[in-house]
Image: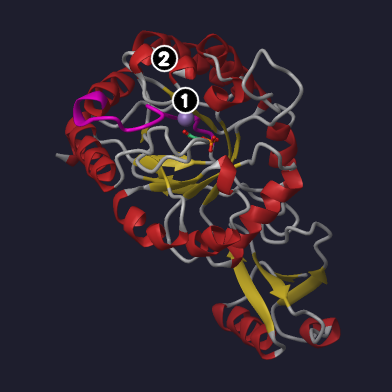
């Protein structure tokens, strides 16, 4: 249910509505829009009497949200959600490019990659320190050491960093280092983890599980939003199908559909969606043409030596070409790829 306040409603009137919702045993989530405030009401709503709310000063009307994902739905929040990460806005007209290696393998590998992607025009640096590998015998990531290397690269190249968090108890620690917390495809329905990231005030990139529907992705986002963290990006990274020539099948449909159903920014990961470097740039172009708010791309200076996901990693010069092409598509879509912040700004 949403309680739509009148455009000129006062803070006191909004406060009274919030208190009344709490008194009825439900949970209020006020959404302060440009024109008006709406109070989304979730949880136990049986004791909410629409008539009594309609009598309260400042209330214009009550409507129900038909989608099962209440706070993530466009119905509750018609404007796009826009938030800031470092010097960049996510979810606005800007197209944001995140790039870096699948895994942080060493200090020199990460700094070399960060230098290259920054120069090519990337805004945000990616790199896994805790890796969800299918085999326990594969490289599991450098852990804390990897986070320290990422933090160093952030300071040297003035790039916000995104890294994956796999367990609820690691959230607080990783949030100390990372500007964006990544929830991986394999953890999209790790509800304990979703609760934990819902309680921190750090932007989250929530990746779609390889076997999950768009609705399930939105329900997982709902866990995070209902915990009080509204800075969530949805990420399409490919789903499993019968097709064998690609690692996953890039479900490009998800981009316009998620944008329609939800106000949250939608990112695309053409690296995991295809699993092969030669398809990454075409699919990055396609994602932006379909309306994505940005891409996250794996880049490695020597993909043949990569400890994870080498076959889908772009060499730096190929990544530079991707950025050029994405800029041209962005222009056609009336979007802009912002200039990266200067390197010295954070020094
Ligand atoms: C990754 O970003 O390296 C990763 C493991 O992605 P996903 O969770 O989409 O497989
Ligand atoms: Mn990877």
Q: Which mark is residue 191?
A: none
Residue that protrudes farthest toward the bottom in the picture: 23
Q: Quarter of the image for the N terminus: give it.
A: bottom right
Q: Is residue 78 visible?
A: no
Q: Quarter of the image for the C terminus: give it.
A: top left
Q: CA distance from mark 2 to mark 1?
A: 8 Å
Instruction: Please provide percent x and percent y for residue 38.
Output: 67, 67
Instruction: Please provide percent x and percent y for residue 112.
Output: 23, 21
Q: Which residues are magenta?
A: 93-109
Contact between labelled residues 1 and 2, with CB atoms less than 8 Å apart: yes
Q: Residue 139 lies in what quarter of the image?
A: top left
Residue 169 vs residue 279: left or right? left
Q: Is 204 contained in the magenta span? A: no
Q: Residue 14 lies in what quarter of the image?
A: bottom right
Residue that protrudes farthest toward the left in the picture: 347
Residue under circle 2? Answer: 319
Nearer to me, 3 or 65: 65
Picture layout, residue 332 above or below residue 95? above
Residue 304 vs residue 39: left or right? left
Residue under circle 1? Answer: 297
């Amino acid at each position: 249910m949403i309680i739509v306040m009148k455009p000129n409603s006062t803070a006191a009137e909004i406060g009274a509505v919030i208190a009344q919702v709490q008194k009825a045993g439900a949970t209020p989530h006020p959404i302060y829009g440009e024109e008006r405030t709406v109070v989304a009401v979730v949880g136990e709503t049986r004791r909410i009497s629409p008539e009594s709310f309609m009598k309260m000063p400042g209330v214009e009307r009550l409507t129900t949200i038909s989608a099962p994902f209440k706070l993530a739905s466009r119905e509750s929040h018609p404007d796009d959600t826009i938030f800031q990460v470092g010097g960049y806005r996510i979810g606005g007209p800007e197209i944001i490019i995140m790039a870096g290696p699948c895994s942080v393998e060493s200090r020199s590998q990460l700094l070399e990659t960060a230098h290259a992607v920054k120069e090519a025009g990337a805004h945000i640096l990616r790199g896994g320190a805790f890796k969800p590998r299918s085999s326990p015998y594969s490289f599991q990531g450098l852990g804390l050491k990897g986070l320290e290397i990422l933090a160093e690269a952030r300071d040297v190249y003035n790039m916000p960093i995104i890294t994956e968090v796999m367990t609820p108890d690691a959230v607080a620690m990783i949030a100390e280092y990372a500007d964006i917390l990544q929830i991986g495809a394999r953890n999209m329905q790790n509800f304990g983890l979703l609760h934990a990231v819902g309680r921190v005030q750090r932007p989250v990139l929530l990746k779609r599980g390889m076997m999950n529907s768009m609705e399930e992705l939105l329900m997982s986002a709902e866990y995070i939003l209902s915990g009080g963290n509204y800075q969530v990006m949805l990420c399409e990274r490919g789903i499993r199908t019968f097709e064998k020539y690609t690692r996953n099948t890039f479900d490009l449909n998800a981009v316009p559909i998620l944008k329609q159903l939800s106000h949250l920014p939608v990112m695309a990961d053409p690296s995991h969606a295809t699993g092969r470097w030669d398809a990454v740039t075409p699919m990055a172009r396609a994602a932006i043409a379909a309306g994505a708010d940005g891409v996250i791309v794996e880049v490695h200076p020597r993909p043949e030596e990569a400890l994870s996901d080498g076959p889908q990693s772009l060499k730096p010069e190929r990544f530079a070409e991707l950025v050029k092409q994405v800029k041209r598509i962005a222009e056609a879509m009336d979007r802009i790829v912002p200039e990266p912040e200067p390197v010295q700004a954070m020094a």
